[in-house]
Image (cartoon, rainbow, N blue to C red):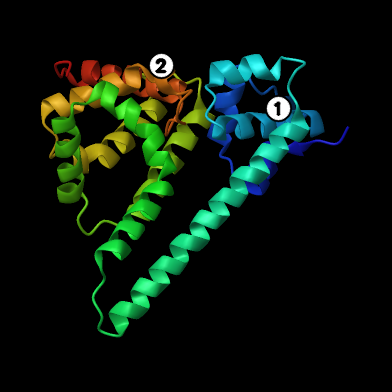
Amino acid sequence: MKTIPITEVCRRTGLSSRTLRFYEAKGLLPAQRTAAGLRCYDETELARLHNITALKRAGFSLARIAQLLDSAALDLPRIIEAQLAALAAQSAALTAASQSLFAAQRALAAGRTLDIDTFCTLIKQGETIMTDKANWQPVLDRYYSPEEQAEWAALKERAFTGFDMQAYAASWKSLTDRIESALPLDPASDPAQVFVTEWNALQAPFMREAAPKLAAGTTKLYDHIDEWSGTVEPPFSKAVWDFITAASAAQRVGTGSAPE
């Protein structure tokens, strides 16, 4: 059976290699190996990947998805039908939002003010398409108080004024992907310490501004990544976090710094 390499799967599906490895580590998605040891996937595995992503978008936890994938009751036609219905709803919502925004833009260009009904419509439509934020909110509520969340929001504004956030996000993705590819790696090794130095440099805008309590909350959040990674996709895997934690500890020992 024909297979395609992981790089091609990522290019054609838009998923990251980190995501595929994450699913594999969770026992959801097996991968074959080429003669060179690289991951590759055939039609059966891609069908399974499709089901994983469809069920995840439908709101199922990874634990429940694992149960459904191994169930004879899993109905691919019904999953596709549900996806089509969801896409139709999303398309209608985006079309309506675009029409409202264009109408508001034309009104402002003509010198007219926007009325209450228009503002309410724009707010509602904006909230409707912010699904990722909604999924993250219960996770944030578990580890940060409302006051701490407000403090984080203010901190982000102070720390990243004038930043190219797209480039910043790309730097984080590049780093976490490189760490993932390098694992397993001795946390005390020179390459590991290079990764930690780069990690700390990317964190610096936050750490210069963050109160110790906020920094501790972030550490706690990722220490418990297994508890919430089935609800939203984390920005990096538990393996990456465990490595950074161990490599940072090794760096403190090497420099004689006290544990944070």
First along the sequence among labels 1 and 2: 1
Residue 16, percent from left and from top: 56, 39
Residue 53 sits in which quadrant?
Answer: top right
Up-down relation of residue 241 to residue 90 (above or below)? above
Relative side of 34 to 200, left or right: right
Residue 100, percent from left and from top: 41, 66
Amino acid on which disc 1 is placed: Gly
Residue 57 visible, this orientation: yes
Q: Residues within 10 Å of mark 1 (few under 14, many from 20)?
A: few
Between 17 and 65, the one nearer to me in the picture: 65
For label 2, the SS is: helix
Quadrant containing the N terminus is: top right
Mark 2, residue position: 227
For label 1, the SS is: loop
Relative side of 32 to 237, left or right: right
Residue sticking out furthest to the front: 117
Q: What residue is rendered at 18% in x and 50% in y?
A: 157
Mark 1, residue position: 37
